[in-house]
């Protein structure tokens, strides 16, 4: 699948520079939507990154990092913990199209994929800039990636 190949290519180019020492890790922030974690985990495993990352799931991923003071604090508390005890060298945010959190909180519409895509880009850009400002040691190692809408095959039993 082309989307999986693109995801793997992105991960390789983003993660490899972060994992210089044997114990270096990266933090992945993704949405709680269960359509996507397997694809992320499989891509990380295929690239031999198993055990080299932590995975935090919050509703809307980038949206969660700025949703409210409480959600932002939860995200930052996790990030601070792994930075102190990880050792985490970078952050990758995985947003996805057709996200209920973005529809409910960011006002995106399932019928407007271009508008939704732009809103994800705007929010990820804002969040990554805020992360780099607060944690300058991550300056060149904070990335956002927008996963396409998951295609679910329907299995019909006759």
Image: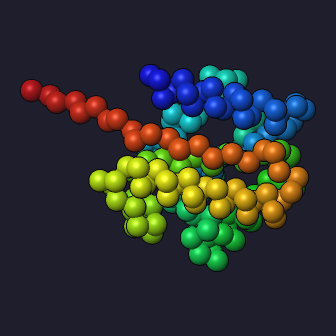
Quadrant for the N terminus in the image = top left
Report if residue 86 is visible in the image: no
Quadrant for the C terminus in the image = top left
Instruction: Judge whether 19 appears above or below 142 on screen.
Output: above
Relative to 54, is 110 on the left or the right?
left
Relative to 147, is 100 on the left or the right?
left
Instruction: Judge whether 18 appears above or below 72 on screen.
Output: above
Place of residue 126 in the rendered image (x, y in percent of width and height, measured from the top left): 65, 61
Which residue is the extreme one toward the left? Answer: 158
Residue at screen point 14% across, 28% down = 157
Place of residue 39 in the rendered image (x, y in percent of width and height, measured from the top left): 51, 33
Instruction: Judge whether 26 appears above or below 83 on screen.
Output: above
Relative to 105, is 47 on the left or the right?
right
Residue at screen point 44% across, 39% down = 148
Relative to 37, is 20 on the left or the right?
right
Q: How is the image coloured?
A: rainbow
């Amino acid at each position: 699948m082309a989307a999986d190949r693109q995801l793997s290519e992105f991960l390789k180019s983003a993660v490899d520079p972060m994992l210089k020492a044997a114990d270096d890790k990266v933090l992945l922030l993704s949405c709680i939507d269960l359509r996507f974690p397997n694809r992320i985990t499989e891509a990380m495993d295929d690239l031999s990154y198993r055990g080299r990352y932590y995975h935090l799931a919050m509703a809307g991923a980038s949206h969660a990092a700025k949703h409210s003071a409480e959600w932002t604090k939860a995200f930052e508390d996790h990030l601070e913990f792994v930075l102190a005890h990880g050792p985490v060298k970078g952050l990758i945010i995985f947003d996805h199209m057709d996200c209920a959190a973005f529809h409910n909180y960011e006002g995106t519409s399932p019928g407007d994929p271009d508008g939704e895509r732009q809103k994800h880009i705007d929010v990820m850009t804002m969040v990554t800039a805020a992360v780099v400002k607060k944690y300058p040691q991550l300056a060149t190692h904070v990335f956002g990636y927008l996963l396409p809408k998951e295609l679910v095959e329907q299995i019909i039993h006759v």
